[in-house]
Image: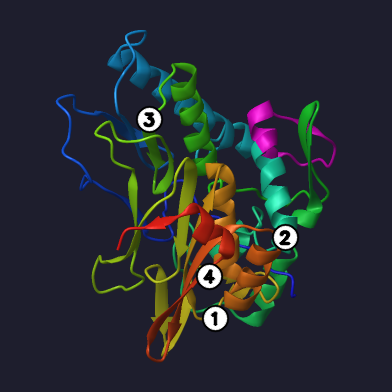
């Protein structure tokens, strides 16, 4: 299979629509007690936490402050929009020796590199310069579609092969000083996992955690019913449901390329970049959903499979026994694929 890398979204620009949402219709009549709902802003998007009931050992306000402090810490470590964050300082570092970072940042980069190689380089946290070149980064579009000379030059500045990570002591290392990391294609998922850990520490066993469309659920909703997740139909003209599922105690992430694109001279340019060519992808895979125990992992995998395309995504999903649901565009509409592991884990409700 050919070597590919994925696009990493920025903190403040969500490059694809949120293609997962929680279905609130209960399967059973609700109990007298209402679920607790907490929400706020983080990482350039929103967070939502729903718990079936709150133990007497912690107050609602105390829990929300703990969550907000945690997410603020992650932002201070990994945001490219905070000039003094660990990630920003590493990006600005003009040497190629080991650069000390927190254990959290090292862990996220380490997982990003694992996904990079697992998916045959389809997930790459260094691809930001190509994203910016094609007009999908914070600077926006600047004039005409880039020519091949600009593409070739930008390609020399990307590639996780130039990056190393170690957990002990936690450090990062690059072998080209221009290397630029953007963790926002995986850090939201990490944030979901960390919030879930806070809930677990307080003996909260029934919850849903979401950051900007990345979700993780456990238990039930407090009324005896399962958490139901809707996978959006990949169309630009409406917000419609393709499938409603329950996923057990797992995380779920969906990546789609059907909303964030532009057209010029009759050519459609997707926000997903194929780094082997330095150009937007042109295949017909339009939506990828991944179920996994870790939200961080499902977050990265969903983007990677969307970059890889239909055949390669299926091959890796089956080889690695991953729970993956794909939708591709055909002449007659859409075609679905569910991996064997997806069928094992997921219950379809429509």
| Quadrant location of the C terminus in the rendered image | bottom left
User: Residue tagged by mark 1?
Assistant: 283
Q: Nearer the viewer, mark 4 or mark 3?
A: 3
For this rendering, which residue is in front, 327 or 154? Answer: 327
Earlier-in-chain disc, 3 versus 2: 2
- In the picture provided, is 12 more to the left or to the right than 244? right
Label 3 secondary element:
loop
Quadrant of the frame with the N terminus: bottom right
* Residue plotted at (28% across, 40% down): 225
Q: Height in image: 204 above or below 120?
A: above
**Residue on which the image places disc 4:** 134
Q: Position of residue 251 (x, y in %)?
A: 48, 45
| Residue at image point 30% right, 73% down | 236
Magenta stretch, residue numbers: 89-107
Measured Cα–Cα span from mark 4 to mark 1: 17 Å
Estimate how packed mark 2 is, as few (under 14), some (14 to 19) or many (20 or more) residues with alpha carbons within 10 Å: some
Horizontally, residue 277 falls left or right of residue 204, namely right
Estimate how packed mark 1 is, as few (under 14), some (14 to 19) or many (20 or more) residues with alpha carbons within 10 Å.
some
């Amino acid at each position: 299979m050919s070597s590919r890398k994925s696009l990493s979204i920025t903190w403040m620009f969500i490059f694809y629509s949120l293609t997962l949402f929680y279905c609130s219709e209960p399967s059973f009549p609700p109990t007298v007690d209402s679920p607790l709902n907490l929400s706020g802003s983080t990482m350039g998007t929103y967070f939502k936490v729903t718990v079936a009931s709150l133990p007497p050992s912690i107050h609602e306000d105390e829990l929300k402050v703990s969550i907000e402090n945690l997410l603020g810490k992650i932002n201070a470590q990994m945001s490219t929009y905070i000039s003094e964050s660990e990630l920003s300082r590493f990006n600005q570092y003009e040497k190629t020796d080991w650069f000390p970072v927190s254990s959290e940042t090292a862990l996220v980069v380490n997982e990003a590199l694992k996904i990079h190689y697992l998916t045959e380089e389809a997930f790459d946290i260094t691809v930001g310069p190509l994203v910016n070149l094609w007009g999908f980064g914070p600077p926006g579009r600047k004039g005409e579609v880039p020519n091949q000379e600009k593409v070739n030059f930008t390609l020399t500045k990307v590639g996780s092969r130039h990056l190393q990570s170690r957990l002990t002591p936690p450090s990062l290392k690059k072998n080209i000083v221009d290397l630029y990391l953007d963790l926002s294609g995986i850090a939201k998922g990490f944030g979901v996992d960390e919030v879930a850990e806070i809930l677990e520490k307080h003996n909260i066993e029934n919850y849903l955690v979401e950051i900007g469309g990345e979700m993780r659920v456990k238990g039930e909703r407090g009324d005896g019913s399962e958490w139901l997740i809707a996978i959006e139909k990949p169309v630009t003209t409406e917000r419609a449901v393709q499938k409603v599922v329950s996923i057990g105690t797992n995380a779920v992430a969906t990546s789609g390329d059907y909303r964030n694109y532009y057209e010029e001279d009759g050519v459609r340019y997707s926000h997903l970049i194929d780094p082997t060519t330095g150009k937007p992808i042109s295949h017909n895979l339009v939506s990828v959903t991944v179920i996994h125990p870790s939200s961080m992992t499902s977050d990265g995998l969903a983007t990677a499979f969307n970059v890889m395309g239909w055949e390669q995504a299926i091959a890796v999903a089956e080889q690695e026994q991953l729970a993956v649901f794909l939708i591709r565009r055909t002449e007659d509409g859409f075609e679905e694929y569910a991996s064997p592991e997806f069928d094992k884990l997921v219950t379809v409700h429509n």
